[in-house]
Amino acid sequence: MKKLIIPTLMATTLAACGSSSSDGSNPLPPQATLPSAIQGALQKVEGSNLYVNGAKIPASTAQVEMDDQRASLGDLKPGMVLDIDTNGFEAVEVDYDALLKGPVSEVTDSSLVVAGQTVMSAQANQFHSGDFVEVSGHYQAGGIQASFIEGTDDLGIVEVEGQMTNLDTQAKQFNLGQLTVNYANAALDGRLSNGAWVEVEGSINKLTMTATEVDVEQAPGFDEDDSVELVGTISWINDDQSLMTLNQQWQVAIDTQTQFDDGENRSQLKVGQLVEVDGLWQAEHNRIRATEIDIEDQDHDGDDTASSRQFQVEGTAQYADGTLSINGIELVLTTNTQFEDGLNLATLNGSYVQLEGYVQDDQFLVMEVESEQPELSIDLQGPVSANPVSLWGYSATDASLDSHAGQWVDLECRFDPASQQLSACQLDH
């Protein structure tokens, strides 16, 4: 399963100098030059050195694994997304797991469909329907942006990683994108829940997968303030650019201490951009606090499709038996959901909150929960229902919502907390 490897504990023992020392001082330990954990696409292997995220990583004594099997540096290929554990000076462990292995069902000049997942690649037209391929890369709103893709032997086993949605424990199935996964006879490792990141193995028939194994991604076992570096695609970013999700997996906090390269700033961050993040692990919040961010594709204007599927809603939360709703509309809390302002699951029910997140497979995945107070204006982002016309269950006393019926909108409206009704809604530019 693709994950950052738990970094080894680094300890330095300062040995006292002998009596021959003239000043009695102790030598300073060498400064670590590498983060504890690194994730990124391999650029090249040169001798016993790996080049990832523009950095040279000595790896002469590293243990290498590919798909949970022992391997060597020579087995690694450019474009493979690697998880690297270091001791601060050289790689200790190097792990590679394919993001996707399966049959090609559709091909265009710039993309192919593999096991129900759309894969974007400039090499797409080199493959044909029926080919079996291995893919490494990052998930975006429209599918997977491949950094590595090659043909491989069809051993009858399909592997897919992704974010679980539409879990049905009665029917024993869930969705990974367009793929419906039946897990009735699968060996399960971990607790299944909507929004969880899973790796699935099994067989496939069109868009139905019969799983033999389902592994749920566990939270990384990093220590507080472990240094982490990763490159990934922005899946979601909140309204004030203080929190974002990378690769649908990693929450990254951005604060006033976060530095940006080349004169960039947080206002330039957009969904769909590729960024490199250096930061420190915050164990309490299960997230990275970014110390430095570099926007890798500065000319990228963001993914309009993905941005249009972000949502924001305010209202009184109803939470019972693991189900969250506002005005009767269900939303999904995930392992990545960040609670702010002292809120938690125990205090959520009945609280007036602002929720932000994004839609995946027609489910509202909540990324951030903040405490709010009802005011006379309200910002709402999401789908306007047509019959009756409403936005997040709020109707309008005028016709300001009518022209937006059936659309996904970002609106600023007047709000009457007493009647819970909107008026004078207009697009929030």
Image: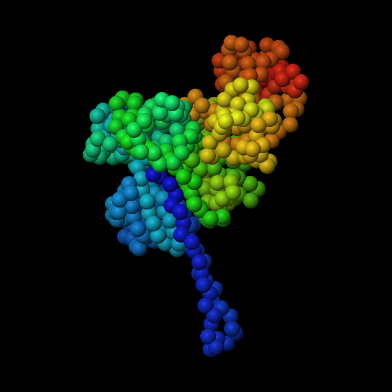
Q: Is residue 43 at least partly visible in the picture?
A: no
Q: Looking at the image, is 236 positioned above or below residue 7? A: above
Q: At which x and y percent is residue 111?
A: 35, 30
Assign the C terminus to one quadrant of the image: top right
Q: Is residue 191 left or right of residue 317?
A: left
**Residue drawn at the location 49% of the way across and 24% of the way down:** 362
Q: Quadrant of residue 207?
A: top left
**Residue drawn at the location 45% of the way across and 36% of the way down:** 192
Q: At which x and y percent is residue 83?
A: 41, 50
Q: Looking at the image, is 424 positioned above or below residue 261? A: above
Q: Is residue 172 at least partly visible in the picture?
A: yes
For the residue pair 219 and 245, the one nearer the viewer reads as 219
Assign the N terminus to one quadrant of the image: top left
**Residue drawn at the location 66% of the way across and 39% of the way down:** 343
Q: Is residue 21 left or right of residue 353?
A: left
Q: Quadrant of residue 316?
A: top right
Q: Is residue 360 left or right of residue 328?
A: left
Q: At which x and y percent is residue 290?
A: 57, 49
**Residue drawn at the location 46% of the way across and 59% of the way down:** 8
For the residue pair 222 and 397, the one nearer the viewer reads as 222
